[in-house]
Amino acid sequence: MTKKLLLKAITTGIAAGTIVFSAFTPFVINADVVTRDSGTTATLVHNGRLTICKLDRSHYEIVRTVKRIVTAYSPEPDQTDSTPRIAASGQEVFEGMVASNDFEFGTRLRMPELFGPEILTVGDRMHKRKKGMMDVFMEDKKKAIEFGAKYNVTVEILAS
């Protein structure tokens, strides 16, 4: 093999390796997304073919704070109705969905002392006699029972 062919093979190998490496290795870009009400930071992950935007959801503006009794429920007909996987909003239930008679569907909220920075969404209702209470959906019935009732929980209502 001549020097010229060897050099060409090495150069081609390096170029091909660089292209393959860059095609499958994501790089992270930090971007500031400014909304009308407050600033929010987003992380953009881009690998040449796909860009994923991960919002930092811990900086939503708190509209007001209330105190509530918080319980948990699971998709059991004895805890819900004959369609335990369908919420009153028509959505399928999910971890992070809250049943409440005090707020509109789609209201975003946090309960920092129970769930840290996780954002929960109102999508279901409780019995009409339940005022001042919230029910958090949990897939696992045992976890819901162990959760029990939490009294005087601080609930942060977030800007829409």
Image (cartoon, rainbow, N blue to C red):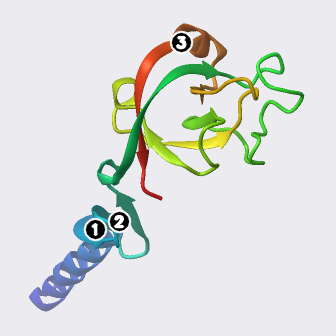
Tell which circle, 3 or 1, labels the residue nearer the N-terminal end. 1
Pick out the residue farthest to the right: 82
Residue that carries the numbered disc 3 in the rendered image: 149
Residue found 73% across the figure and 23% down from its top: 129
Element at badge 1?
Answer: helix
* Amino acid type for the residue under numbered disc 1: Phe
Q: How many numbered marks are there?
A: 3
Q: Nearer the viewer, mark 3 or mark 1?
A: 3
Amino acid type at circle 3 is Ala
Q: Does 79 sit above or below residue 89?
A: above
Q: Which quadrant of the structure image shows residue 141?
A: top right
In the rendered image of this protein, does residue 71 appear above or below residue 82? above
| Residue at which label 2 appears | 24
User: Badge 1 is on which residue?
Assistant: 21
The answer to the question of whether label 1 and label 2 lie on touching residues, with beta carbons closer than 8 A, is yes
Q: Is residue 26 visible?
A: no
